Image: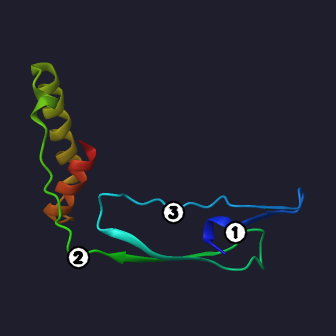
Amino acid sequence: MRMWQTGTFYSARYNKFSCIDYILMNKTGNIYLKKAETKSIWISDHAPLIAVLGIDSNRRQRIWRYNPVVSANEKDRLKLQKELCEFFKINDTGEMKQTTIWDANKAFM
């Protein structure tokens, strides 16, 4: 039986099985789902799921680039500059690698 046809949750109240589990992945990443398996319900009302992930080493890593349209307006550019200065003042304490701070900055932006 296929995984999506089996119930992974049992409701004793309604005496019914349903599938309420999701595996969320980024389609542009280099990680993919190799195998998924539903185990038997035995301790709780949820069935354990086993997911085997694979890494596609052939995919190129995309290079992050700043979109200059974001700061085309002078007011927006000054606000962004102020927030970036504040970000680095708070986070660049010398305790973390510069690459970690830069990656966090990209997420912050």
In the displayed image of the protein, which residue is found farthest to the front?
1
Instruction: Tell me the quarter of the picture where residue 16 sits.
Output: bottom right
Along the polypeptide, which appears first: circle 3 or circle 1? 1
Q: Which amino acid is tagged 2? A: Ser
Question: Dot 1: what SS?
Answer: loop
Quarter location, residue 27: bottom left
Q: Residues within 10 Å of mark 3 (few under 14, many from 20)?
A: few
Q: Pointer 2: residues within 10 angstroms few (<14), some, or many (20+)? A: few
- Tell me which residue sits at (37%, 77%) in the image: 54
Amino acid under disc 3: Ile
Res. 44 image quadrant: bottom right
Image coordinates for residue 82, horizontal then vertical, percent = 16, 32
Mark 2 lies on residue: 57
Q: Could you give the CA–CA distance between mark 2 and mark 3, rounded to whole angstroms?
A: 21 Å
Disc 1 designates what residue?
6
**Which mark, residue 39?**
none
Residue at figure coordinates x 16%, y 30% from the top left = 70
Distance from the alpha carbon under mark 2 to that under mark 1: 32 Å
Work out which quarter of the rendered image holds the C terminus and state it.
top left
Q: Position of residue 81 (x, y in %)?
A: 13, 33
Instruction: Report the mark closest to the observer, 3 or 1.
Output: 1
54 to the left or right of 3? left
Q: Residue at x 34, y 69 (%)?
A: 31
Q: Is residue 59 left or right of residue 53?
A: left
Q: Which residue is mark 3?
A: 23
